[in-house]
Amino acid sequence: MSHTIAALLLLSSSITGGLGAAGQAPVVSTAAATGPNLRACFDGRCELTLSRPVSFRVSSRYGITRLSITFTRQVVRVKGTGPGVSSQATLGAGASGSVNGIGVRVVSLTGRKAALRLSPVR
């Protein structure tokens, strides 16, 4: 068998995950592939696990209209912006802070992922 055919067979097998006894492909969850549900954060209350920087709309009741989140291995930067306003918090793993009334807790932080909990500050 040539190297090209062997490589194609290996690629085909890894893409389909192999077929079951009934000839059906296995079920694959797409939750991780689609990323976090950022619309759920509009009200300032959600839990996120991020693998890349994000930016999303938030309710204007917080005095801002957009929240942008970036992270490194050491810190998470949360920036809130709106017409004529900008507010930012820089937080380490396990830290809590707020941006214009939206509380942010860094649940966990690695070089590849940041897990956050957002909730309104009372």
Image: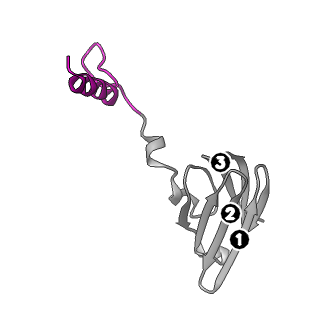
Disc 3 crowd, CA 10 A, few/some/many (<14, 14-19, 20+): some
Instruction: Locate the C terminus and report the quarter of the image it occupies.
Output: bottom right
Q: Position of residue 49 (x, y in %)?
A: 59, 48
Q: Is residue 75 positioned above or below 15 on the image?
A: below
Q: Check residue 115 in the rendering and tell me which mark sits there, or answer none.
A: 3
Please give the name of the residue rendered at 72% of the width and 56% of the height, measured from the top-left corner: 75
Q: Position of residue 27 (x, y in %)?
A: 37, 28
* Residue sitting nearer the eye, 82 or 11: 11
Q: Quadrant of residue 25?
A: top left
Mark 1 or mark 2: name the one nearer the start of the chain: 2
Q: Name the amino acid type tagged 1.
A: Gln
Specify start and end residues of the magenta stretch as a single range.
1-28
Please give the name of the residue rendered at 61% of the width and 62% of the height, measured from the top-left corner: 69
Q: Check residue 79 in the rendering and tell me which mark sits there, or answer none.
A: none
For this orientation, the residue located farthest to the top is 21
Label 2 belongs to which residue? 77
Mark 1 or mark 3: name the one nearer the start of the chain: 1
Instruction: Locate the N terminus and report the quarter of the image it occupies.
Output: top left
Q: Check residue 88 in the rendering and tell me which mark sits there, or answer none.
A: 1
- In the image, 26: left or right of 44? left
Q: Distance between the Cα atoms at labels 2 and 3?
A: 13 Å
Q: Is residue 29 positioned above or below 3 on the image?
A: below
Q: Distance between the Cα atoms at labels 1 and 2?
A: 7 Å
